[in-house]
């Protein structure tokens, strides 16, 4: 049998384009308002979806004459954040929706959606910090108990403790080679999602620990240190956060951290005739720097059994 015999006979099947829409999904927008030393941050994930019968040709013929590029839609989100501010997600989306459907009158409709990521100011000594924030919810508390023969180890911790400071962070002085493009900076956003686990000393475990109180105290001190330390690198912030926990609580033997460096890139608004002096950022989700480290109280014995099967660093 020849191969051609196996092909179906030609038919008169016809197809048509059904419902469709297109746009940019999950535009990560962070807007810093820095009119005074007390910064405000607004953080949205925005999705634009545009529709119109006139768009059919783009699907059926490859005719892009009426296709406002999804890249343009993304730029519009950032430029509008600069030009008009953000405000409520509803009003921000209304502005975008009106723009797309009036500036390009062939669009019959649009679906604009947003998730708002809520931040609270970090409180330091009862005072709300001007430019350091923690995601509402303050992370998830974790605990591990290891029984190893007669020994009992207790690890406490937190994960997804997402923090951001809109200034008070620099990064420079790093080696440059032929592959280095990163610009040195003396003012950047520093943001991370802290995973920390701390081990209590066996003596403290035996004597009894007010686990709730230490957990709350460790979080308060770590957050205050994140807020107050003028950071030269996330590595430096990590060490200082571990140090403050160990200094404040004699029950703690060591702290292990994993901290993704959640990069925020300044959006280049110059092509749209707009300046961007540290106000509108693209919050990238990957790749991210991953900074891990352990801070250890001098003089305490190592306890490898405490960490068995617990990832040292995530
Ligand atoms: O705080 C930082 N530490 C790094 O090691 C690093 N590397 C990088 O590209 N940016 C940063 N930021």
Image: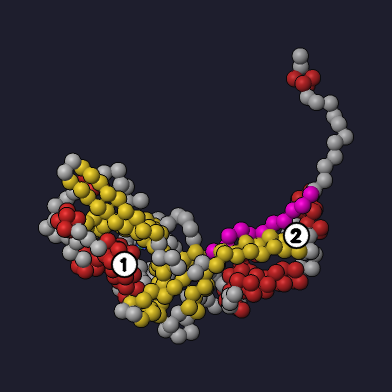
Give the side of residue 308 with respect to residue 274, left or right: left
Residue for point 34% across, 55% down: 142
- Range of magenta residues: 18-30
Residue drawn at (34%, 73%) of the image: 227
- Element assignment for label 2: strand
x then y, percent, for residue 101: 75, 68
Farthest residue toward the left?
299
Kindly tell me whether residue 227 is visible in this rendering: yes
- State which image quarter holds ligand 1: bottom left
Which residue is under mark 1?
216
Could you say which quadrant of the image residue 38 lies in? bottom left
Is 228 magenta? The answer is no
Q: Position of residue 132 (x, y in %)?
A: 39, 74
Q: Nearer the viewer, residue 84 or 111?
A: 111
**Residue at the spot x=31%, y=79% of the render?**
125
| Residue at far bottom of view | 36
Residue, disc 2: 51
Residue neighbourhood size for the residue with mark 1, other residues' Cα within 10 Å, grouped as few (<14), some (14–19), many (≥20):
few
Q: Position of residue 73 (x, y in %)?
A: 65, 64
Kind of element beneath mark 1: helix
Note whether ligand 1 is within 8 Å of mark 1: no
């Amino acid at each position: 049998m020849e191969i051609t015999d196996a092909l179906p006979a030609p038919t008169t099947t016809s197809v048509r384009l059904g419902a469709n829409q297109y746009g940019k999904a999950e535009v990560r927008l962070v807007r810093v308002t820095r009119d005074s030393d007390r910064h405000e941050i607004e953080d949205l994930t925005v999705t634009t979806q545009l529709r119109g019968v006139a768009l059919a040709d783009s699907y059926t013929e490859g005719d892009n004459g009426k296709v406002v590029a999804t890249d343009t839609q993304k730029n519009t989100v950032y430029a509008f954040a600069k030009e008009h501010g953000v405000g409520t997600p509803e009003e921000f989306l209304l502005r975008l929706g009106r723009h797309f459907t009036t500036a390009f009158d062939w669009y019959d409709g649009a679906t604009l959606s947003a998730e708002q990521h809520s931040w609270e100011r970090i409180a330091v000594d009862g005072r709300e910090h001007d430019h350091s924030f923690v995601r509402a919810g303050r992370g998830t508390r974790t605990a591990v108990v290891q029984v190893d023969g007669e020994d009992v180890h207790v690890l406490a911790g937190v994960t997804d403790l997402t923090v951001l400071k809109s200034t008070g962070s620099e990064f420079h002085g790093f080696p440059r080679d032929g592959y280095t493009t990163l610009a040195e900076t003396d003012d950047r956003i520093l943001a991370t999602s802290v995973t920390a686990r701390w081990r209590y000393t066996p003596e403290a475990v035996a004597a009894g620990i007010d686990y709730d109180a230490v957990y709350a105290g460790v979080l308060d001190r770590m957050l205050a240190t994140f807020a107050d330390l003028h950071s030269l690198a996330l590595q430096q912030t990590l060490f200082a956060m571990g140090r403050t926990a160990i200094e404040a609580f004699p029950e703690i033997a060591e702290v292990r951290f994993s901290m993704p460096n959640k990069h925020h890139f300044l959006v280049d608004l110059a092509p749209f005739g707009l300046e961007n002096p540290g106000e509108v950022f693209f919050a990238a989700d990957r790749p991210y720097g991953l900074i891990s480290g352990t801070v250890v109280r001098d003089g305490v014995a190592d306890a490898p059994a405490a960490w068995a099967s617990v990832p040292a660093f995530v």
